[in-house]
Image (spheres, grey):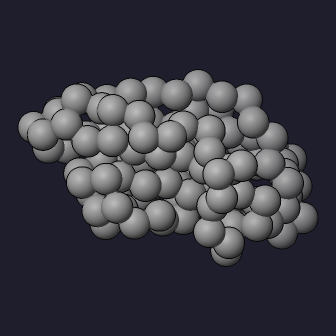
Amino acid sequence: MQTYKILGQTAPTANTETLNYTVPASTSTTIRSIVITNTSSTPDTFSVFLVPTAGNSATNANYIVLNNKIMGNSTISLKYGYMLPTGAGIRIKSTNGTSTFSTYGSEMS
């Protein structure tokens, strides 16, 4: 059965790669969107990575967004259709730690 939902919501510490979502066992996931909101008036930069194993740190091959600038008090919505297998994950990073990340999609078991 396919379930649409909020997959992850994260407010990472400054300049720290952080796990936003892990695909559960016996499940595949479709990422529909990732919404990034800078909650500060100061600009920030952010990165998003798709990693084959959620517990592993990202490598250069895992970037889908690298050091993208987001203005202060603004929101960016990234639209995707990525399919992730069991155990894969989304990792995120905010340079200043002022941006939040919300991931939306569906899981199918």
- Mark yes or no: residue 106 visible: yes
Q: From the viewer's side, name the closer residue of 8 and 51.
A: 51
- The residue at the point 83 percent across, 69 percent down is 25
Q: Residue at x 89, y 64 (%)?
A: 26
Where is residue 60 drawn, in percent x and y? 65, 51
Residues 88 and 48: in front is 48
Q: Residue 50 location, x and y as percent?
A: 67, 50
The picture quadrant where one finds residue 30 is top right
Asked if 94 appears above or below 106 in the picture, the reply is below
Residue drawn 12% across and 40% down?
Answer: 42
Rendered image quadrant of residue 87: bottom right
Number of numbered tags placed on the structure image: 0
Q: Is residue 15 left or right of residue 85?
A: left
The correct choice, above or below, for 8 with respect to 69 in the image is below
Q: Quadrant of the C terminus?
A: bottom right
Indicate left or right for 29 with 90 as reference. right
Q: Is residue 6 visible?
A: no
Which residue, as the protein is rendered here, is positioned at the far left?
Answer: 41
Q: Residue at x 71, y 49 (%)?
A: 61
User: Which one is in front, 61 or 52?
Assistant: 61
Residue 106 appears at what percent x and percent y? 71, 42
- In the picture as drawn, the residue positioned furthest to the front comes out as 60
Find residue 58 and report its horizontal and vertical position in percent: 63, 61
